Image (cartoon, rainbow, N blue to C red):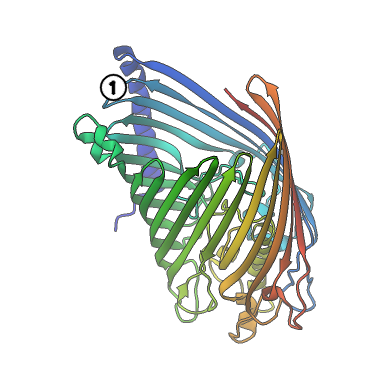
Amino acid sequence: MYHPSATRWRAWAVVATLLALGAFPVGASALPGVFAFESKAEARTTSTTVSAIEAPGASPEDIDRLPPSTMIESRLRAGGALTWHLGHAWLQTLALQVQADLFAGPRWAEGVPDRLSADALLSADRSPWQLDQHLVRRLALEADGRWGRIAVGRQVSTWGLGLLAQNGDDEPYQFGLKRRGAVVDRAQLALLPAGFVGDGSMLAYLPLALVFAADDVVDDDLARARDGDSAQQVIAAALLRYPELEFGVYGVQRWQTDRLGLGLDVNVGDVYARWKHNFGKTKVMLATEWLMIRGTTTWFRTATSPSELNVAQHGGMVRLRVQRGDVGVQIDGGLASGDESPFDDTISNFKMAQDMRVGLVLFGEMWRRQSANIVTNLGDPRYSGGAPAGADRFASNGSITGARWLSATVRAKVERLTFLAGVLAADAPTLFVDPHRTGLAGGKPTGPRGGAASHDLGWEFDAAVQYDQPLGGGISLRARMDLGVALPGAAFADANGVASAAAGAAVGQLALRGRW
């Protein structure tokens, strides 16, 4: 298979965008139409405080917990769209989409141990002047017509409920915050077959879109171009979209080589559906997404497969949302496949997108730190000559991984105040194991604190309050506080069966927002 280089893909995307932009004023002088411009900006500062986390070192004499930590980070996200409404059936609009993230931090008010270096966010303590903190998320030209859409340039990749590809935008029922999303340089063609027939009225009966895209990955959960990773993917999807019903299938072939020369070559199949209906004043939405990943990787090595490993992962989610007026409830149930045999020839532990928010503490903070700690234990020179190649990939980076969960969130709005309360219960579809301690035990499945491997991950309780104050001129101020506590289950017990201490987190946000 021919794998085009990241440089070549990005060069073609830039050339195509420049040609399109050059043609824009020429077309504008020849065709009538109406121009519209809209912009949006948010300056957000966040402080995240996490309690001590039970995460022991490689031997009984080492530390048995990570200290409390406080992180401060800021982000300015700004962008807009210039749209030219032409009004023609075959070329209805031309639009230029622009958006950038400017990050400051993270800065650690209380330090984080070096043993968490496998997690890029937890190991960072950065000046706001570092250029690699900043990212152009969108710089794309789009042409829309009755026949479909062509889009070329820098875009944000998203699909379905966001299990695999997230746009990084916050959602009304989530706790905590989303940071970035998946950013790609993309050439995309979306065709509406029914739009080619007659006067276009067939679109109401068959609103089917066939989508084809080629990506060079700029920044996502698996690859970051600025760090030396090279990742490409081709996408084919079909989406049927009625006013009350959506159904789509999505296929991806992805190949990449990271900065260490380790590779990944996988295929993804994904199916998504969403139904929504109003029963009087009550709005109901039911949605689901399920996916399967198959392929090979050289990220890891085992005694049975010293050259490459198979990838066999799956996951899914079902979401029910019921809302009446300013009160609503959302119930989520999901699955991310696990891997209770870390030394065989197959990686089956699936990580959902890092910005898929489920609860606040259990996955996003507690397991994030524990999994990064395990990577350090794997490379401890007292037990190993060094961490296996690609071992840092075991760190979850806050993703839901190897888990089943059921969560419920209630949301209520009273004038300018919004309240959320949530509960989460989680277990593992396979025994939840620590590869370092399992290796020390001669292959006997062992948990991250030395206890017998278990399915029970535990419970979590969360709450949040948010206040929005309009300031006039399209500007508003948002203040928010999220609090959560996780009660770890038997999977996190020690060798004596003693449960892990509860873990807590508090996230405070202050944001100045504008829309014009």
Q: Nearer the viewer, residue 507 or 203?
A: 203
Instruction: Name the element at disc 1.
Output: loop
> Residue placed at 51% from the left, 44% from the top?
167
Q: Is residue 203 above or below residue 428?
A: above
Q: Quadrant of residue 509?
A: top right
Give the side of residue 253 with respect to residue 383, left or right: left
Q: Residue 56 in the image: x percent, y percent? A: 74, 72
Q: Quadrant of the C terminus?
A: top right
Q: Is residue 387 above or below residue 412?
A: below
Q: Quadrant of the N terminus?
A: bottom left
> Residue placed at 76% from the left, 75% from the top?
499
Q: Residue 4 in the image: x percent, y percent? A: 34, 50
Tell me the kind of residue under disc 1: His
Q: Nearer the viewer, residue 1 or 238?
A: 238
Q: Is residue 384 visible?
A: no
Q: Nearer the viewer, residue 73 or 364?
A: 364
| Circle 1 residue | 88
Q: Is residue 61 visible?
A: yes
Number of other residues with Cα within 10 Å of mark 1, as a class: few under 14, some 14 to 19, many 20 or more: some
Give the side of residue 250 with respect to residue 169, left or right: left
Q: Quadrant of residue 76?
A: top right
Q: Is residue 231 above or below residue 137?
A: below
Q: Nearer the viewer, residue 411 or 384?
A: 411
Q: Residue 59 in the image: x percent, y percent? A: 74, 78
